[in-house]
Amino acid sequence: MVERKSFLKWAIAVAALLLLFNLPGGCTARIKGIFKDPVSPVETFFIKTAHSLKAGADTVRGFGGVMEKNSRLSEEVIYLQAKLVGLENLEQENRHLQDQLDFYKRQKHTLIPCQVTARTISGWWQSMRLDKGRTQGVEAGRAVISPDGLVGRTDEVSAYTAEVLLISDPACKVSARVSRTGSFGLVTGLGVNAQGYPVARMQFIHKDSPVRAGDAVVTSGLGGVFPKDILIGYIETVGMEEAGLYQYADIIPKAVTELMDVVFVTGEEENAEAEE
Amino acid sequence: MSRRFITVLLAAGTVLQTVLPSWNAFGALELPLLTGLIIFIALHTDRARMFYAAVLAGLLHDSFCPAPLGLSIPFFVILAAGVNWIRDEVFGDQPATYAVLGAVAAVFELLYYASIFKLSGLRPMSGGLLALRLAGGLMAGTVVVPLVALTVEQLDRLIPRNRRRYI
């Protein structure tokens, strides 16, 4: 009897697990949202605190550098150096904000600015989490861009968070074009290289196309998910596939390598007004 | 250790694991905080709470990454059951015990996910990346798991004895 009960328990557990695996996508996103949404403000708090600490550390480092030259400099210079560091930080922040504003104005699509709150919990995936979700108009399968170029696409969206598959993730595929030659291809993520940098590969480039290292790769706009002519990155190496039918090019995705704190999720395309 | 305390611990561990930067030199390896917590819980609680913790850890882990929901539950359940099975044979409060269990758990975790991803074709992976992650996992498991255990022990001591029944 005891054995039968134990067997029944295990059978129920396995059945529950199988059921969990086979839940439809929307249902899974909702269940994940139950865990993610309450935690999102805590993550945002951590990220903001980390940024403040970093800014503080930068300022202290500035003071330290000045102290090293203390034998030659007066206290007034120290004060001015510290002020300069503060001003440089402000100038840099101002430039970032200006870039983001210009970038925002240039887009034909409506853009939803989002704060990056966390990266994925597992190193097997190349993804990150944003602080906005369904309630703020973010939908699954939308392009995520920054002034540096394409970041990835939204994957699972809960009420208050959105998971973004980075362009360096093997599950993220983008129809792309080499800007100089106009050659088309498909960009697929390769994860991270030995140095820890995210990498992607453009496949199915015509074998006679004169692509070379340093060429810019942009989105082709085919497929409908990603807007046209968004920078993906620059070609690092070019090679020929084993069968000799196509070329491939390894790309360093610029926007992922220099990932910013604020990214934009694309919405619907704005027609006349934006195009003017 | 009550279920509420376990829940708070796992939630905090999950947040920390997502917020702390990954170890890029070792294939974007994450710090095994949840693994450390499950090892500690398996060594210090009864089976019912241990299974509760393992299932919750699996759900939390999968909720914070694009993996299919439930993928990590068998890993945490097997890990917890394994640790619980040998808990009478080991010195549960020694850092060395946690270091060894952390290293073994890191190898098991790598083999578990690598085999699942290989069989399902969910993630492409190379031998080089696996070797890199194995080396990093062994180091991270050996160092992080004893630290996690030490921290949880201290936290557990902070809770007044007369309140432990309720918290």
Image (cartoon, helix red, strand yellow):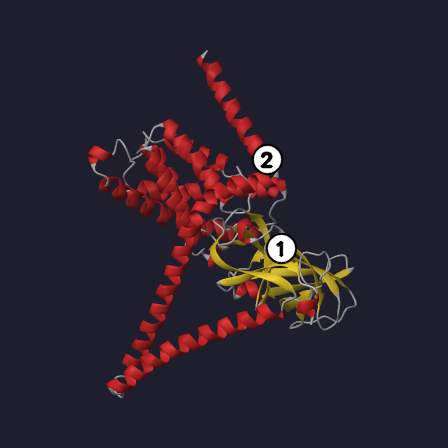
Report the quarter where the C terminus of chain A lies.
bottom right
Q: Name the subunit of mark 1.
A: A
Horizontally, residue A195 falls left or right of residue A248, namely: left
Tag 2 and tag 1 share a subunit? yes
Residue A209: % across, % down: 77, 68
Horizontally, residue A118 falls left or right of residue B5, namely: right
Q: For the residue marked with disc 2, what is the amino acid?
A: Leu
Residue A263: % across, % down: 54, 62
The answer to which of marks 2 and 1 sits earlier in the sequence is 2
Q: Quadrant location of residue A23? A: top right
Numbered badge on residue B43: none
Q: Secondary structure at mark 1?
A: loop
Numbered badge on residue A23: 2
- Which residue bears the numbered disc 1? A142
Residue sitting nearer the eye, B103 or A77: A77
Q: Name the subunit of mark 2.
A: A
| Mark 2 burial class by Cα count in 10 Å: few <14, some 14-19, many 20+ | some
A150 over B157 or under it: above or below: below
Q: Residue at x 50, y 63 (%)?
A: A262
Q: From this viewpoint, is residue B79 visible?
A: no
Horizontally, residue A67 falls left or right of residue B132, namely: left
Q: From this viewpoint, is residue A256 visible?
A: yes
Residue A177: % across, % down: 71, 65
Residue sitting nearer the eye, A187 or A245: A187
Q: Quadrant location of residue A86? A: bottom left
Q: CA distance from mark 2 to mark 1?
A: 22 Å
Q: For the residue marked with disc 1, what is the amino acid?
A: Arg
